[in-house]
Amino acid sequence: MNASQPVVLYDYWRSSASYRVRIALHTLEIGFETVPVDLLAQAHKAPEYLGINPQGRVPTLEIDGLVYLQSLAIIEYLEETRNAGFLPRDPAGRQHVRAIAHTIAMDIHPICNLGVVAHVLDLAGGGEEMRSAWMQKFIGAGLDAVEVMLTGHDGTFCHGDTPGLADFCLVPQLYNASRWGLDLSRFPTLSRIGTACAERPAFIAAHPDAYRS
Ligand SMILES: N[C@@H](CCC(=O)N[C@@H](CS)C(=O)NCC(=O)O)C(=O)O
């Protein structure tokens, strides 16, 4: 580990996985530069980028002199090396936070990924209307479940009164939900948490509009 190396995030402004990591870095006030990887221009499939990230996905984070892949693994690395407090200390609390994070990042996100949806549309011969219908169905169903998982929860954020891993996943997914035309009033608890996050400097600084390329 070499903490004196520059911190570099390879990201795409609208990528929700990149947005998660930006929120975590801003929360820790870690200065970083970004290298935009334009997904629409297929820059993630260029040989130079595949040399850094063999999956051809964003984000990739260079930090402490090393290269890290996978947004949740990156955030947990920051948690462990910076004593960040992104996860609660008690095992039941950690389970709860990870369950919300995984529902979003491992269940909703992969089936709404750019490459996956493009392939579905290719196979089905669909266009923009089908893309929106797909996004609304799977983002909606996934967030309906997260809404129930948080029912009866009275903390300001997904777990207690400090934002953490679950909030870092939720906010980008709410951004996507709005982008694809879902009415967020359908998720009252998630909307309340999203509004509380939107007031925090780290979430404001990490917003896609601040990284539009
Ligand atoms: N599980 C990965 C997912 C990364 C991922 O799929 N990123 C998307 C953008 S949000 C991507 O690079 N998509 C490119 C594609 O679908 O071709 C993580 O959490 O980092």
Image (cartoon, rainbow, N blue to C red):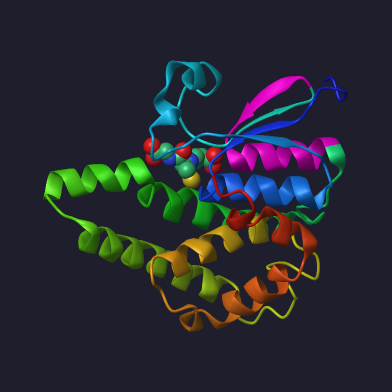
Name the magenta segment's main secondary structure.
helix
| Image location of residue 205, percent across then percent down | 72, 56
Vertical position of residue 105 compared to residue 77: above or below: below
| Residue at image coords 67%, 78% | 153
The part of the chain drawn in magenta is 65-81
Query: For the C terminus, which image quadrant?
Result: top right
Vertical arrangement, residue 36 with respect to residue 109, above or below: above
Which of the two residues, 125 or 144, is positioned nearer the viewer here? 125
**Up-down relation of residue 111 to residue 158 (above or below):** above
- Please identify the quadrant where the N terminus is shown: top right
Residue furthest toward the left?
125
**Residue 138 figure quarter:** bottom left
As rendered, which of 201 and 145 lies closer to the eye? Answer: 201
Residue 106 relative to residue 61: left or right:
left
Identify the residue at horizontal 51%, vertical 16% (top origin): 51
Q: Check if residue 118 falls in the magenta segment.
A: no
Which residue sits at x=45%, y=29%? 44
Q: Is residue 80 in the magenta section? A: yes
Percent x, y for residue 204? 71, 61
